[in-house]
Image (spheres, helix red, strand yellow):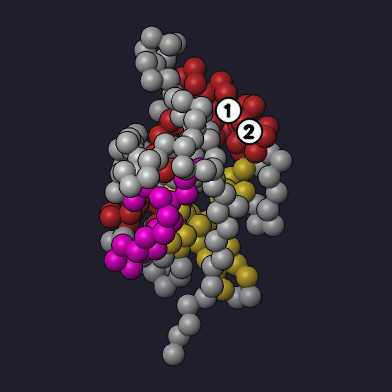
Amino acid sequence: MVLTGDFVTVPLFKKYLGGSKRAARFIEPCANLLAQLHARRGVLAILGNHDAGSDPHRITEALQAKGITVLRNRSIPFEQGGKRLWLAGLDDVLERQSDLELMLRPVPKTEPVVLLAHEPDCADSVSRYEVDLQLSGHSLGGQVRFPLIGAPYLPPLGRKYPRGLRRIRGLTLYTNIGIGTIRLPLRFWCPPEVTLITLRRRQTT
């Protein structure tokens, strides 16, 4: 099971509301809820731009204290039946913490990679590397959508690929629209989403 970030929300007028670090105080109750998740291969997470822009060390420690592995420019292998799959986690792009080269350094080029990257639009850069699947969040799908018009607002790096399945060069991207809200506790024509993805070995001839 994977979580693609934004466990807290930095206030819009952060300098007038106690600063961005205060947002991290909400990570403990959030981590307590997430501790109820159980998966055979464990629960892995990356940080979102709100997490990275508040107190990323506190947030990382709170999640890991509940058994959730936080990947920050790091890749870890999973083995089964003599085959190996890598789960890679990119630190936040908007907060300029990401390092694709460092993250992929230990990964053999012949082995499949699933990348967790908070902002979906970084897929254009990721597609130049040996990554098979990118899982992202960030956009909330716009949170509010109107028929024929779509979302009136999407965040930076969540505007080109705001939701659903895409193919960019050799990379498959899926952008999940998440379960929460930001600023306004409202969703319209954009229901919360938890996605089940089945990975299948590529057939060779």
Q: Which mark is residue 27?
A: 1
- The reply to whether residue 131 is visible in this rendering is no
Which amino acid type is shown beneath numbered disc 1? Ile
Instruction: Give the vertical position of 172 relative to 175 (above or below).
Output: below
Q: Which amino acid does label 2 sit on?
A: Ala
Q: Visible in this render: residue 114? A: yes
Percent x, y of residue 193? 54, 47
Question: Magenta residues, as a range?
Answer: 161-178
Whether residue 130 sits left or right of residue 39 in the image: it is: left
Name the element at disc 1. Answer: helix
To which residue does mark 2 refer? 31
For image coordinates 31% across by 62% down, the residue present is 168
x then y, percent, for residue 103: 41, 52
How many other residues sit within 10 Å of disc 1, few (<14), some (14-19) or many (≥20)? Answer: many
Where is residue 46? Give x, y as percent. 49, 43
**150 left or right, relative to 115:** left
Cβ–Cβ under 8 Å for marks 1 and 2: yes
Q: Nearer the viewer, residue 166 or 44?
A: 166
Q: In which quarter of the image is residue 156?
A: top left
Above-or-below relation of 1 to 92: below
Q: Say which residue appears at 52% left-offset and 23% top-offset.
A: 24
- What is the quadrant of the C terminus in the image? bottom left
